[in-house]
Structures are given as C-alpha cells and as structure tokens.
Amino acid sequence: MKIAETMDLGQLLDLMATDTDGLRKQTMEQASEFRKLLVRDHDGQDTAEIDGGRWMALCCAVDPAEQSN
C-alpha cells in the first residue's frame, strides 16, 4: 500500500502487528498516529518497502503498552 495522508486506516490496521494469539491489539487511533509517522518519514513509499525492524519500531511508538516499558 502506498504511504500517503489518505491511506485507509482499516487497511493500515490490518498491516499492524498482532498479539501472540493472533488478535489485533491496535486501535483506530493508534493506526491514525502510525499513519502520521509513516507519512512523516516514508511519504510516497510502499509499505512493503519498509524494513521489518523499522516497521515494528514505528508500531511500538504508537503503542501505549510499549511506552511504559
């Protein structure tokens, strides 16, 4: 999916990490914040082009549970 301010949050949410049970743990609000980070740092790129470690770091950046660790 191409990274842009108009990215569909539902589709982006599907690309975000899941917990160990395979259940979605992110919210639409987190997806919105994640989109802002992606647009800021990777505008115009395809989501598949982003390194997995970088992707997870950005996911963690919008996860309140990760911020308390």
Image (tube, rainbow, N blue to C red):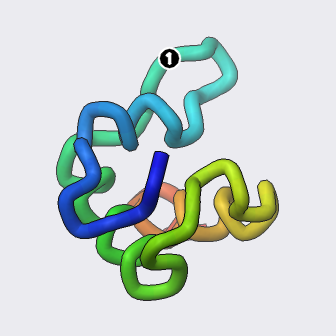
Position of residue 23 relative to residue 19, above or below, is: above
Which of the pair 1/34 is nearer the observer?
1
Q: Residue type at mark 1: give it.
A: Leu
Position of residue 13 relative to residue 61, above or below, is: above
For image coordinates 21% across by 43% down, the residue present is: 28
Which of the pair 65/27 is nearer the observer?
27
Helix, strand or loop at label 1? It is loop
Residue 31 location (% of width, % of height)? 31, 51
For image coordinates 45% across by 55% down, the residue present is: 2
22 sits to left or right of 15 = right
Residue 8 location (% of width, % of height)? 24, 43
Count of numbered circles on the image: 1
For image coordinates 60% across by 15% down, the residue present is: 22
Which of the pair 33/40 is nearer the observer?
40
Q: Which residue is mark 1?
A: 23
Position of residue 66 relative to residue 22, above or below, is: below
Check the picture and name the quadrant holding the C terminus: bottom right
Which of the pair 64/54 is nearer the observer?
54
Residue 33 location (% of width, % of height)? 29, 67
Estimate how packed mark 1 is, as few (under 14), some (14 to 19) or many (20 or more) residues with alpha carbons within 10 Å: few
Residue 21 location (% of width, % of height)? 62, 13
Locate residue 52: give its quadrant. bottom right
For image coordinates 35% across by 33% down, the residue present is: 11
